[in-house]
Image (cartoon, rainbow, N blue to C red):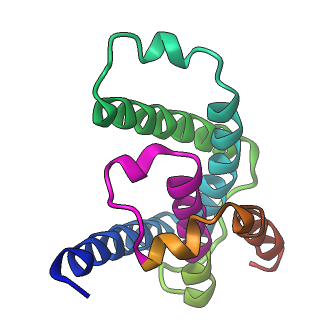
Amino acid sequence: MDTATILHFLSEFAYLLVVFFAFLSLTIIFGRQMVINIIFGLYLALLITIQFPYYDKVLNGLENTVAIAITKLAFFAVVTVLTTLLFKRLMPEEYDENKFESFGKKILLAVLATVLVMIFSFNVLPVTELLTPGTPIQSLFAPQEFFFWWLLLPLLLLPFL
């Protein structure tokens, strides 16, 4: 392996770790229900952003691929926040537990949310414009034939958490 490949892998691994620890922190601070709301918000945001018919108007005047990628990511983030707030309003109240109580479930919820962000990043969102393709992490999450199974995994495991 050359130095560039190692640096690209480390940057993607850092991306994965930052996403995981962000979700783990949210789970510890705000509780399990918050990350469950985020997971459902991510699913709904995926549906909305895939079917959004006005990208050409939102991206009007942008010619740089990095600027287009950042705008699409920002749009997805805004939609995710709005859909998460919707689920926060619709879903039941928080679990009554201490910050480090049922820590294993909190870790698993953070892993499930991280999986969703990673598969969205490499299959739907234009993150590959910002990261170099071809690393082992992308080979795990990016293949189109695994997208459905990675998408299904959190839905199958959520009832047990």
Residue drawn at point x = 57 percent, y = 79 percent: 106
Q: Nearer the viewer, residue 140 or 44?
A: 140
- Horizontal side of residue 93 vs 29, given as left or right: right
Residue drawn at point x = 65 percent, y = 54 percent: 37
Q: Which residues are magenta?
A: 110-135
Q: Position of residue 120 (x, y in %)?
A: 57, 54
Quadrant of image for the C terminus: bottom right
Q: Position of residue 16 (x, y in %)?
A: 40, 71
4 lies above or below 125: below
Residue that protrudes farthest toward the left in the picture: 3
59 lies above or below 126: above
Q: Nearer the viewer, residue 105 or 126?
A: 126
Residue drawn at point x = 26 percent, y = 77 percent: 5
- Horizontal side of residue 72 vs 92, given as left or right: left
The quarter holding residue 61 reads: top left
Q: Nearer the viewer, residue 113 or 127?
A: 127
Residue 124 part of the magenta-drawn span: yes
- Horizontal side of residue 62 vs 83, given as left or right: left
Dominant SS type (magenta): helix
Residue drawn at point x = 59 percent, y = 77 percent: 97
Residue that protrudes farthest toward the front in the picture: 2
Residue 43 part of the magenta-drawn span: no
Q: Position of residue 100 (x, y in %)?
A: 49, 85
